[in-house]
């Protein structure tokens, strides 16, 4: 994750006005979750103590990732081929605890907004969201007591996906692809409930005019690869969207949507 570019096929990205066509389109993102590279290297990763919490280096990595993205977009858009190009961001619904408002704004700027500004000239913004995080005066705060957690220790918070999609669309003005979401759980009934809540949130955003072109679940290897190996279990890939019929996994079918 993070250090690799990605290319793939997603059904909902189709030519406007060609509703009868089922042919998927190719798309490309320059760097997957480029906002996590500095974070994992210098803040929450497994780096040595000599470079841990090096804020200057973290920001320098962010700037390098923005430059790399822009060069990647230029190269891909120059051909051969003609396909949508963008980036994907790892996002959370971020909330401030009392006294944490300034920390929240700084976190948004460092983790999301500085990368949103780098999307000018892109064709889409990829949003990858699984949960919600809290910020207090001293930094990231614990989960809210009483909110269930997943195998990854994240809050069970499917409504965060809708929140992040709306925020990304409002700030960038670009079509949104929900390129990852899901839940790490062994319980398919819980997975079905989670995905149903995510898709209902997507439906609400679509009804309000948010330009969401499709949504995909995160595979278990995607969720766990950057964190804990192959332990946690998540969701098989499927897509829905305004412009295409659904291609459901069993969990999507169980959601009734």
Image (tube, rainbow, N blue to C red):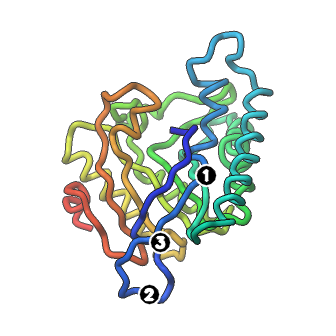
How far apart marks 1 and 2 lie (CA) works out to 27 Å
Gap in angstroms between the C-alphas marked 2 and 3? 11 Å
Left or right, 26 with respect to 30, comes to: left
Upstream in the sequence, badge 2 or badge 3? 3
**Which is nearer the N-term, disc 3 or disc 1?**
3
Q: Secondary structure at mark 1?
A: strand
Q: Is disc 2 placed on a helix, strand or loop?
A: loop
Q: Position of residue 180 (x, y in %)?
A: 44, 51
Residue 162: % across, % down: 48, 59
Circle 3 SS class: loop
Residue beneath disc 1:
30
Residue drawn 27% across and 68% down? 257
Above or below, 220 against 136 in this view is below
Residue 13, disc:
3
The residue that appears at 74% across and 38% down in the rendered structure is 102
Instruction: Determine whether, in the image, residue 159 is placed left or right of residue 98.
Output: left
Q: Is residue 27 left or right of residue 181?
A: right
């Amino acid at each position: 994750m993070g250090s690799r570019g990605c290319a793939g096929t997603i059904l909902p990205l189709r030519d406007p006005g060609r509703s009868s066509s089922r042919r998927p389109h190719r798309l490309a993102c320059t760097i997957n979750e480029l906002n996590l590279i500095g974070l994992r290297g210098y803040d929450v990763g497994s780096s040595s103590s000599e470079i841990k919490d090096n804020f200057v280096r973290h920001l320098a990595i962010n700037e390098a990732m923005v430059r790399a993205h822009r060069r990647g977009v230029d190269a891909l858009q120059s051909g051969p081929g003609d396909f949508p190009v963008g980036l994907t961001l790892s996002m959370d619904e971020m909330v401030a605890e009392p006294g944490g408002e300034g920390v929240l704004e700084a976190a948004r700027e460092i983790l999301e907004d500085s990368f949103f500004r780098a999307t000018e000239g892109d064709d889409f913004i990829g949003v990858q969201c699984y949960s919600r995080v809290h910020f207090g005066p001293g930094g990231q705060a614990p989960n809210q007591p009483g909110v269930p957690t997943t195998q990854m220790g994240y809050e069970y918070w499917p409504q965060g996906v809708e929140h992040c999609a709306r925020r990304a669309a409002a700030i960038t003005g670009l079509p949104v692809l929900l390129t990852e979401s899901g839940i790490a759980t062994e319980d398919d009934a819980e997975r079905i409930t989670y995905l149903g809540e995510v898709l209902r949130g997507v439906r609400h955003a679509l009804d309000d005019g948010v330009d969401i072109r499709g949504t995909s679940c995160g595979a278990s290897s995607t969720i766990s690869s950057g964190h804990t190996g192959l332990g946690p279990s998540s969701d098989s890939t499927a897509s829905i969207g305004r412009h295409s019929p659904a291609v459901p996994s069993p969990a999507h079918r169980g959601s009734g949507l």
